[in-house]
Amino acid sequence: MTVYTETIAGHTFSFPDLRTLLAKASAPKSGDALAGLAAESAEERVAAQRALADIPLTAFLEEPVIPYEADDVTRLILDTHDRDAFAPVSGLSVGAFRDWLLGYSVDGATLEALSPGLTPEMVSAVAKLMRNQDLVLVAQKRRVVTRFRNTLGLPGRLAARLQPNHPTDDPAGIAAAIIDGLLYGCGDAVIGINPASDSPQRVVELLTMLGDLIDRYRIPTQSCVLAHVTTQMQAIERGAPVDLVFQSVAGTEAANKSFGITLGLLAEARDMALALKRGTVGDNVMYFETGQGSALSADAHHGVDQQTCETRAYAVARHYKPLLVNTVVGFIGPEYLYDGAQITRAGLEDHFAGKLLGLPMGCDVCYTNHAEADQNDMDNLLTLLGVAGCNYFMGVPGADDIMLSYQSTSFHDVLYLRQVLGLRPAPEFEAWLTDQSILKAGCELLPAAPHHPLLAAGPWNA
């Protein structure tokens, strides 16, 4: 192991390994402080950042933050690393890589070609040297386009996950939220329900309801019931109309085991979903959610800071070619991200890192009621991520998820961002909204007529 040192104002700071250096260079996070990993002063943080800037990118291939033999995520990262793609930046230090990324000549095509050559630790390291505006600038260069029943991630487009959760999985309550969201022009990313029950039978019932709705109204979107992946696999075996397979993932083998998953299980689930051939314009069948602090909350972080653990989760996600990846940025609580400033920083870091690694990143811009944050903080992060080119956001009735008991973004918030930034829904979904007299061409919402077809009663919303 290499010992890294840096002198600030006559005081020399020493960092015994790359893992420690990354942690000490991190922006302040309550989770890192809780884990005893954070810098103990601003001077130590600056010293770590200065030392980190001089580290060659190749060091992250030579010194894994979690040993190769101890962790299957590390093995996945190193075994799939594309050295040819890495070649254009292989001679750079972390600081020089930051300057390269910010250069005018580096565009989306350049970053797309580079993505397979980057490891999560390289991306996490360079993010630690960036201001918020740097994270926005680089992320907006990179578009990641995916397809299932519509096309997501195109320039000038912004999608929304319609999230109609209900505390008792009541079909009428879920249906009312779905109608509300569709009439606001939301739902092109996915109509995705977090079920109150993980029973296979309930999941099949919800999937059947969503499938009937999409088929009846010929909606060019996809559905998902966000149960555990094994429950969704059982639903496939029972003949349920599964579009996307969902799972929360983390950046270490131990954290994924705490979720009840392995990399092999994810591959098996993806194969099952692909075999259904339910996509009409593409075959990206996976949906993953992540969030800073998940590995720490499972005591499975191996002394690695929470931003680096989060970025390692993106290596897991990209291996399975997902349609959607979503950082649920403030959901775990103030023990990990204390206030609006930390939530904002984490959201920008996550989106930047995911895009640089080639993922179709969305963000659940959210907070829990005991965090030092409010909806104005969420407005700020929502707007910054919109400028940064985030693929999609959540659409929750009233921005208040009554099942999961946290605050997110509303259908109106998605309309706000589309309007202020001149963004439009996914093209296939936009055409359907226009045909249904829900939107004018572009992003202007039309008032719903009293007898609009979506308001009609049907077996799916009985």
Image (cartoon, helix red, strand yellow):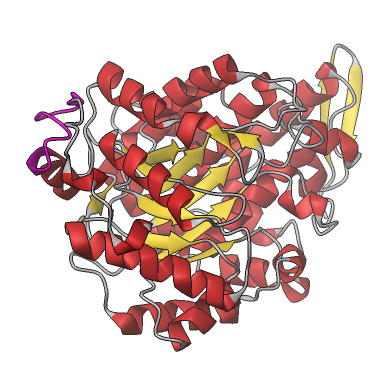
Looking at the image, residue 379 lies above or below residue 310: above
- Report the front residue among 232 and 311: 232
Is residue 399 on the magenta stretch? no
Looking at the rendered image, the quarter that the C terminus falls into is: bottom left
Residue at 29%, 42% (x, y): give it: 182
Q: Can residue 310 be seen in this view?
A: yes
Q: In this rendering, would 325 be left or right of 21?
A: left
Is residue 436 on the magenta stretch? yes
Where residue 103 appears, as percent x and y from the top left, is 36, 27
Looking at the rendered image, the quarter that the N terminus falls into is: bottom right
Where residue 35 appears, as percent x and y from the top left, is 88, 42
Q: Can residue 88 be seen in this view?
A: no
Looking at the image, residue 90 lies above or below residue 82: above
Q: In this rendering, would 168 be left or right of 210?
A: right
Residue at 64%, 32% (x, y): give it: 128
In the orientation shown, which residue stands out farthest toward the top?
9
How would you classify the magenta stretch by its main secondary structure?
loop
In the orientation shown, which residue stands out farthest toward the bottom?
237
Q: In this rendering, would 356 be left or right of 16?
A: left
Q: What stretch is highlighted in magenta?
A: 434-446
Residue at 61%, 38% (x, y): give it: 329
Where residue 29 appears, as percent x and y from the top left, is 76, 30
Residue at 59%, 25% (x, y): give it: 344
- Report the front residue among 193 and 43: 193
- Report the front residue among 420 and 36: 420
Where residue 27 appears, as percent x and y from the top left, is 71, 27
